[in-house]
Amino acid sequence: MALSRRTLLGLAAGVPLSAALAACGSSGPGGDGGATYWYLSGQPQEGARAGAVDTFNKAHPKGRIKDTTFQNDAYKTKIKTAIGAGQAPTIIWGWGGGTLRTYVEAGQVEDLTSWFGEHSDVRKGLFPYSFGAATVDGRIYAMPCEVVQPIILYYNRRVFDQVGVKPPQSWGDVMALVPRFNAKGIAPFSLGGQSRWTSMMWLEFLFDRIGGPEVFQAIMEGEKNAWSHPDAIAALTKLQELVKADGFVKGFSSITADSNADQALLYRGKAAMMLHGAWSYGIQQADGGDFVPSGGLGYMNFPPVDGGKGDPGNTVGNPAQYLSISSKAGAEEKRTAKEFFASGVLQEDETKRWIDNGSVPIRLGTEKLLAASKNADFLQFTYDLASEAEVFGQSWDQALRPAAAETLLSNIAKLFQLSVSPQQFASALNAATAK
């Protein structure tokens, strides 16, 4: 990858943000009809994103896209700062939902409703439900892109065979497995707890499995004391019971997801299980040697909780990823961005790259490509999980507004560290989300 063209700001920890922004420009590469585009780094996903840009640039030499990559956690801070300063890239990569709503309310992104009306073929070519998190008050402000990413419970088959146990079919099974693995010196669950959003996934599933999607829906609607619902307290309590039982790898609070250290614990057999996104499969495949090809990686949906109200077929995660256009960009930059949406996003080469990475693109009509892939079993599992779920809940830190999401993440860290009780957690979040 040519660093002279593709900048990796996520690795430049010592560079002040103002200098970094000045280096890559505010909204365009300099009067050539091109556009700027920021997105996440990290393989194998970065390769698919970069490949789409390269293919587009070859076909559009007079309206090129200059791309810049960031690590996940760094990106969330830098894009918010850049947008607030009026220095956003032309194309804004994101997860839709609550963050997109704040951009819309601040007048920072283009209304794409009429554009999609004129390009109905683009809209009809994507999973219909992917437009939910792209829509604010009935108007479309983002282009759904890339892949569907439900959260999946992964497990190391070799470790399970070694200990002589089976994958958990209920929460009771989860708790029963914890001492079995600990007795063998194997962490029951890997967790990149320093990143916080990895810990959040546990609560998303426990809330759903115990209380059903209505519990978080009440939170989203700003109902008073919604976090104090008995099912919410039960979910928070069960999570802390797992922590107290040494369910997670020692030192999880200092492990980051960006480093993929949590992934390595699983494929190296240091941890038996890991709750993570569908993207994890590609990382395990790329970094785990023969782990995936030899059938060492197992995967399943999150198990039900005994007595819970939630449908065990429900899932959570990212229905898609999303591209918005900065309202501050120039006319030519916006034109380039829209041309990229029409002819550069999820075209044949990019779609094939995602499938080769073990991901399910949100483009319709890919069934034959999925079936022909070396990753066909996992791709079919992911496709079925996402398409058959009665409810596909969006990741909480994206569904909520940014300020509430930050309060959520900081309190999740405290919850996992056992420094706040379930009731204290609920009180802090009630104050942050109630209307």
Image: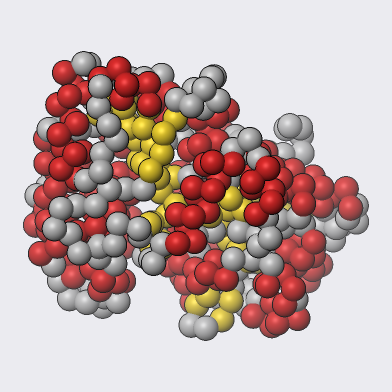
Q: Is residue 86 in view from this perspective?
A: no
Residue 294 percent coordinates (x, y): 52, 22
Q: Is residue 359 in view from this perspective?
A: yes
Position of the C terminus by quadrant: bottom left
Residue 171 percent coordinates (x, y): 19, 45
In front: 183, or 425?
183
At x 54%, y 41%, the residue is 377
In front: 217, or 35?
217
Residue 108 percent coordinates (x, y): 57, 70
In front: 273, or 228?
273
Position of the N terminus by quadrant: top right
Q: In the shown orientation, is residue 296 left or right of residue 357? A: left
Q: How is the image coloured?
A: secondary structure
Residue 325 image-quadrant placement: bottom right
Q: In the shown orientation, is residue 134 left or right of residue 157? A: right
At x 24%, y 52%, the residue is 304
Establish if 137 lies above or below 77: below
In front: 400, or 331?
400
At x 65%, y 40%, the residue is 373
Establish if 23 lies above or below 176: below
At x 44%, y 45%, the residue is 277
User: What count of labels does the image hold?
Assistant: 0
Residue 423 percent coordinates (x, y): 9, 57
